[in-house]
Image (spheres, rainbow, N blue to C red):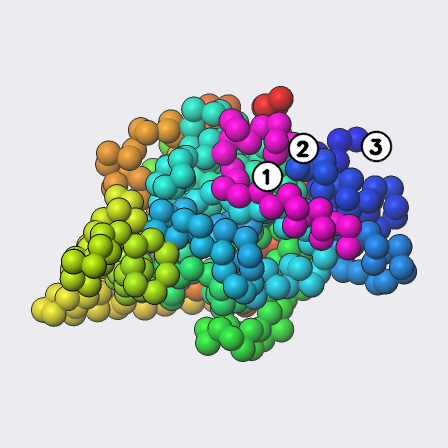
């Protein structure tokens, strides 16, 4: 048998189901791979080897007993460390939650456990998911397996890097402004943001409640769809969860893999072209577009005039919501507490705790958000940003009356060197230029590799209407069938 760590999740699941390999063997192979390379990649913040071995053994015993199991039973998965996992450290990449072990599982974790997935551990991220490079983790950066001097994207760089380094066949991320898709693009992996409300937010450490969306990360489109099907579905514990059936994303991915897109209309967003992606990124994207037209798709140029305001609108809405959400970290109820010597007032303890517990990017966004929500400025900033959000939603609605999906590069540039943008927040924020509009709209989007620029991966983004997640999987799988998957350099 070929190396278990190099197999797709679908292939691993088939091998486990047929008895070609056991869940325990698959888990041990991935734990060994983590031990071999993660000192250089730093994709994981916590490896739950004991829990993973116990879960794998249980799957093997249930299968031996003849029990019918789910299609991903026994397949390992890494979970972004902003998702609550019972008894396993959940830090959100922040010192203020160091050592916190939740007494409950997030809904998506419950669903993965019920489906028989084996949780390997928790992956690194920018603190509270605020960042585009995973350099803002309080526990140190993650490194891109394609080039260890470069960023793996963010905020979910740990989840993407774990895939590219063959430490896990599947991972889970969260996407607030592109934090699943952008890391997928720069690591040559697949990252899918479901429709907002299509996957439960119950058990996520909240960043921006009207934007946060958990979703699947994988090395192939089919694998992402298989994990999506496990994660998705209505959750009565999440008031924003949509009580609608999950689209057949797995069937759509398999249909797309046949390579037939006859009659599918692709909308090319005119305003994105004007922003000017790097020449190599633009060339790889055009090659991907050409590949789709050869499969029968039709390209239609679409104008979405308000997309140009998405970045500033996002950086008012998301910080405002983070300012509200992070108010709970006060040094009183749980987490870090600094300066409580019995002589200091509550306000001083709270201030000292936040000073020590929050990193620079979190402080920056909390300050921006608090200012935008303050008396006298709410209407001028947060209120105006919400009006722009409505206009962007109307642009999407009008576009989808003419085309089936919209397409663009996922990021304007390839993975940049570590440390090259931390001194200039605006240049860092530009990494999410093409991904943010769909978060403000609430629809699904996916990034799939479409080639290389400067020897580094380029992502191709497919955006679909709300609740039409299956459309994006069909187009993404067709592109993958035409251009293939990418293989990073060998770390070992």
- Image side of residue 379 versus residue 253, left or right: left
Mark 3, Cα crowd under 10 Å, few <14 / some 14-19 / many 20+, is: few
Q: Which residue is mark 2?
A: 32
Point out the stretch of residues depicted in magenta.
32-58
Q: Which residue is mark 1?
A: 163
Of discs 1 and 2, which sits in the foreground?
2
Check the picture and name the quadrant holding the C terminus: top right
Secondary structure found at label 2: helix
Check the picture and name the quadrant holding the N terminus: top right
| Alpha carbons under labels 3 and 1: distance apart | 20 Å
Q: Which residue is mark 3?
A: 1
Q: Earlier in the sequence, mark 2 or mark 3?
A: 3
| Alpha carbons under labels 2 and 3: distance apart | 17 Å
* Rendered residue at 41%/56% (across/down): 176
* Rendered residue at 58%/42% (across/down): 47
Q: What percent of the width, then of the height, locates residue 77?
A: 63, 48
């Amino acid at each position: 048998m070929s190396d278990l760590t190099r197999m797709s999740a679908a292939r691993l699941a088939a091998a486990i189901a047929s008895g070609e390999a056991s869940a325990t063997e698959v888990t041990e192979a991935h734990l060994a791979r983590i031990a071999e390379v993660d000192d250089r990649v730093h994709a994981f913040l916590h490896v739950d080897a004991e829990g993973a071995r116990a879960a794998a053994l249980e799957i093997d015993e249930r299968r031996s007993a003849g029990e019918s199991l789910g299609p991903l039973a026994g397949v390992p998965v890494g979970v972004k460390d902003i998702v609550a996992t019972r008894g396993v450290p959940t830090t959100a990449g922040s010192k203020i939650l160091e050592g916190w072990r939740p007494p409950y599982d997030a809904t998506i974790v419950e669903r993965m456990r019920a489906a028989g997935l084996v949780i390997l551990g928790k992956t690194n991220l920018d603190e509270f998911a605020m960042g585009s490079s995973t350099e803002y983790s309080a526990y140190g950066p993650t490194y891109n397996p394609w080039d260890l001097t470069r960023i793996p994207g963010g905020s979910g760089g740990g989840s993407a890097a774990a895939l590219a380094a063959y430490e896990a066949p599947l991972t889970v991320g969260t996407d607030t402004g592109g934090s699943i898709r952008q890391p997928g693009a720069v690591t040559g992996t697949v990252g899918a943001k479901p429709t907002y409300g299509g996957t439960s937010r119950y058990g996520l450490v909240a960043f921006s409640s009207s934007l946060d969306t958990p979703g699947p990360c994988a090395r192939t489109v089919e694998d992402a769809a298989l994990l999506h099907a496990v994660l998705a579905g209505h959750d009565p514990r999440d008031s924003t969860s949509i009580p609608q059936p999950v689209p057949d994303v797995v069937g759509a991915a398999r249909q797309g893999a046949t390579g037939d897109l006859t009659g599918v209309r692709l909308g090319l967003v005119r305003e994105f072209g004007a922003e000017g992606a790097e020449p190599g990124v633009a060339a790889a994207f055009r090659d991907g577009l050409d590949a789709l037209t050869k499969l029968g798709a039709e390209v239609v140029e679409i104008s979405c005039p308000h997309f140009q305001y998405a970045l500033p609108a996002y950086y008012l809405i998301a910080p405002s919501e983070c300012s509200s959400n992070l108010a709970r970290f006060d040094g009183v109820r749980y987490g870090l507490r600094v300066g409580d010597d019995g002589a200091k007032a509550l306000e001083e303890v709270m201030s000292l705790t936040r000073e020590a517990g929050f990193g620079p990017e979190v402080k920056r966004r909390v300050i921006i958000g608090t200012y935008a929500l303050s008396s006298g400025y709410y209407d001028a900033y947060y209120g105006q940003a919400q009006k722009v959000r409505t206009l962007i939603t109307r642009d999407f609605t009008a576009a989808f009356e003419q085309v089936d999906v919209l397409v663009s590069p996922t990021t304007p540039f390839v993975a940049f060197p570590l440390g090259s943008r931390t001194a200039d927040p605006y240049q860092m924020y530009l990494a999410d230029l093409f991904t943010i509009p769909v978060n403000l709209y609430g629809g699904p989007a996916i990034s799939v590799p479409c080639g290389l620029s400067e020897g580094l991966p380029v992502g191709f983004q497919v955006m679909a209407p709300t609740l039409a997640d299956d459309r994006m999987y069909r187009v993404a799988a067709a592109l993958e069938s035409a251009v293939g998957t990418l293989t990073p350099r060998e770390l070992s």
